[in-house]
């Protein structure tokens, strides 16, 4: 593990892309860090709480349940014993992209408009 301090956006992308995993030990309402990691093809080791439960899956993350060193260490060992696919990570991240949101809204509107009659 290495702490690198401030980095530019491009440097952050490179760090994510070259990491074995991104550690996300906190609890946040949403959490962009795991999605940034997935977008770069890198899986996450995450505390099983908050937004991580909405954005991560067993194909994109290894979870730990207790916020202590033992639970984290066990998750890291499980992480190392699995095969992680970059494309699974990227696919999951795309589900939270702006384009996916726009497509979903447009699809919902189109569905609502089926059979609707417009005033003359």
Image (cartoon, helix red, strand yellow):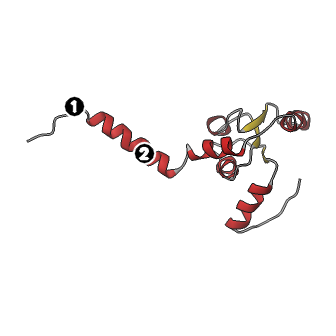
Quadrant location of the C terminus? top left
Using residue 120 as the reference point, say whether residue 101 is left or right of it: right
Residue under the image location 49 percent in, 46 percent down: 100
Could you say which quadrant of the image residue 60 lies in?
top right
Residue 110 image-quadrant placement: top left
**Residue at position x 83%, y 37% from top?**
79
Q: Residues within 10 Å of mark 1 (few under 14, many from 20)?
A: few
Residue at the image position 67 percent from the left and 44 percent from the top: 87
Q: Which mark is residue 80?
A: none
Q: Report whether 111 appears left or right of 119.
A: right
**At which x and y percent is residue 36?**
66, 52
Secondary structure at badge 2 equals: helix
Relative to residue 9, is residue 63 depicted above or below? Answer: above
Residue 97, percent from left and from top:
54, 49
User: Which residue position holds label 1?
Assistant: 115
- The residue wearing badge 2 is 103
């Amino acid at each position: 593990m290495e702490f690198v301090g401030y980095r530019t956006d491009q440097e952050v992308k490179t760090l994510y892309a070259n990491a074995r995993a991104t550690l996300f030990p906190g609890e946040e309402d949403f959490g962009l860090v795991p999605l940034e990691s997935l977008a770069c093809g890198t899986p996450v080791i995450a505390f099983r709480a908050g937004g991580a439960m909405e954005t991560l899956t067993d194909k994109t993350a290894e979870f730990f349940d207790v916020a202590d060193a033992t639970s984290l260490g066990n998750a890291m060992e499980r992480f190392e014993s699995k095969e992680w696919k970059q494309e699974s990570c990227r696919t999951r991240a795309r589900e939270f992209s702006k384009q996916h949101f726009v497509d979903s809204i447009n699809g919902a509107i189109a569905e609502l408009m089926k059979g609707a009659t417009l005033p003359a």
